[in-house]
Image (spheres, rainbow, N blue to C red):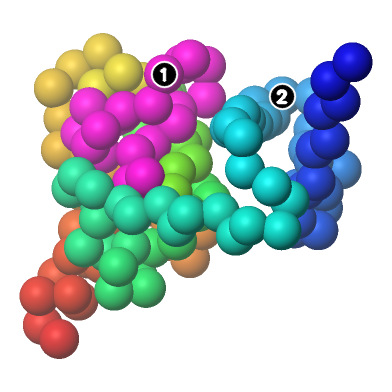
């Protein structure tokens, strides 16, 4: 009989235990014939967020949010290791900040200026910082 063993990084456990009932937690499982001793192949980000991630300005697992007061809308997304955004309430990741923002707002919108990091910095500001370096 096959056995499935799941090992979580302590940071993941901390996130799971601090989640509220309204939080969406995404867990990705990769099944394969790898031994437990073999290191997992690194995931290389691609797409619009890749340069920010490779420069260390944005990390996998980072939480991005926005709030539009006039429209009374807000959104929350998590950056994946592949450089995509998983938006709360949507089953599939989005390839760009603008597509992720459009999924929440229902309008074509510039996600680079809409999404903020936990420190309040927009993705556009991170991109400008990268360009300046």
Q: Quadrant of residue 123?
A: bottom left
Say above or below: 71 vs 16: above
Q: Nearer the viewer, residue 107 or 7?
A: 7
**In percent of the image, x 10 and y 75: which residue is there?**
131
For residue 92, the mark is 1
**Is residue 91 covered in magenta?**
yes
Question: Of callouts 2 and 1, which one flags the residue occurring earlier in the amino acid sequence?
Answer: 2
Note whether 67 is above or below 40 in the view shown: above
Depth order, front residue of 83/6: 6
Q: Is residue 18 visible?
A: no
Q: Residue at x 24, y 48 (%)?
A: 46
Q: Nearer the viewer, residue 120 or 78?
A: 78
Spatial separation of the CA atoms under disc 2 and disc 1: 18 Å
Q: Give residue 39's position: percent from left, percent from top.
A: 60, 60
Name the front one of labels 2 and 1: 1
The residue that appears at 24% across and 22% down in the rendered structure is 102
Q: In this orientation, does residue 42 appear?
A: yes
Q: Which mark is residue 22?
A: 2
Q: Is residue 52 left or right of residue 90?
A: left
- For the record, the magenta segment spans 82-101
Task: Pinpoint residue 84: horizontal percent, then vertical percent.
Answer: 34, 39
């Amino acid at each position: 009989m096959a056995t499935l063993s799941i090992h979580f990084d302590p940071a993941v456990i901390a996130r799971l235990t601090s989640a509220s009932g309204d939080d969406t937690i995404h867990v990705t499982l990769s099944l394969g014939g790898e031994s437990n001793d073999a290191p997992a192949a690194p995931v290389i980000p691609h797409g619009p967020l890749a340069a920010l991630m490779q420069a260390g300005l944005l990390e996998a697992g980072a939480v991005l949010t926005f709030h539009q007061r006039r429209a009374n809308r807000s959104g929350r997304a998590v950056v994946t290791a592949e450089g995509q955004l998983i938006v709360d309430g949507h089953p599939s990741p989005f390839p760009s900040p603008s597509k992720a923002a459009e999924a929440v707002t229902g309008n074509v919108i510039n996600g680079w200026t809409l999404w903020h990091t936990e420190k309040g910095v927009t993705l556009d500001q991170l991109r400008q910082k990268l360009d300046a370096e």
